Amino acid sequence: MVDGAYTYTVTNGEPIMCIADNFNSDPLPMQSKQCYCDQDDYYKQEWIDNDMAELAAKKAQEEAEAKAKIAEEKRLAAEKEAKRLAAEAKALAEKETKARIKKI
């Protein structure tokens, strides 16, 4: 129905101010928004429910992708550290071997 995050509230004909507090959430913090009144009940609850489900799924997917990216960055950092430690250990072993050879 709508491309992008939104929220809604049902007022039963009572007037309300267009502020986030009246909508129980702010789908896009720090961004300007607009309100409109659907007094003709054009937007059916089923459509809204479908939108909310799609938006929740999209948000969950984005969060999962962000977590996967962080996990991959951590894995790469750990791999890099392991390689550094292995190189350091190898260099130390070679140094010790050379020191033993000189003693002979």
Image (cartoon, grey):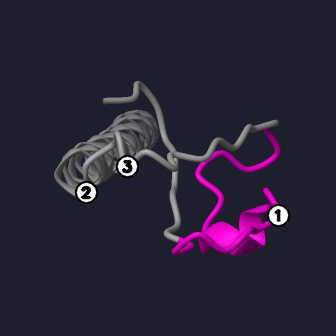
The dot on residue 41 is 3
Magenta-colored span? 11-31
Position in image of residue 74 (x %, y %): 40, 47
Instruction: Look at the image and tell me in which quarter the C terminus lies.
Output: top left
User: What is the CA distance from the residue labelled 2 to the residue labelled 3?
Assistant: 9 Å
Q: Amino acid at mark 3?
A: Asp
Label 3 SS? loop
Please report the residue visible at 79 percent of the width from the left and 56 percent of the height from the top: 18
Closer to viewer: mark 2 or mark 3: 3
Q: Is residue 73 left or right of residue 7?
A: left
Residue behind mark 2: 45
Q: Amino acid at mark 2?
A: Gln
Mark 1 crowdedness (10 Å alpha carbons): few <14, some 14-19, many ≥20: few
User: What is the CA distance from the residue labelled 2 to the residue labelled 1?
Assistant: 22 Å
First along the sequence among labels 3 and 1:
1
Kindly indicate whether the residue at mark 1 contacts the one at mark 3 (C-beta within 8 angstroms). Answer: no
Residue behind mark 1: 17
Kindly indicate whether the residue at mark 1 contacts the one at mark 2 (C-beta within 8 angstroms). Answer: no
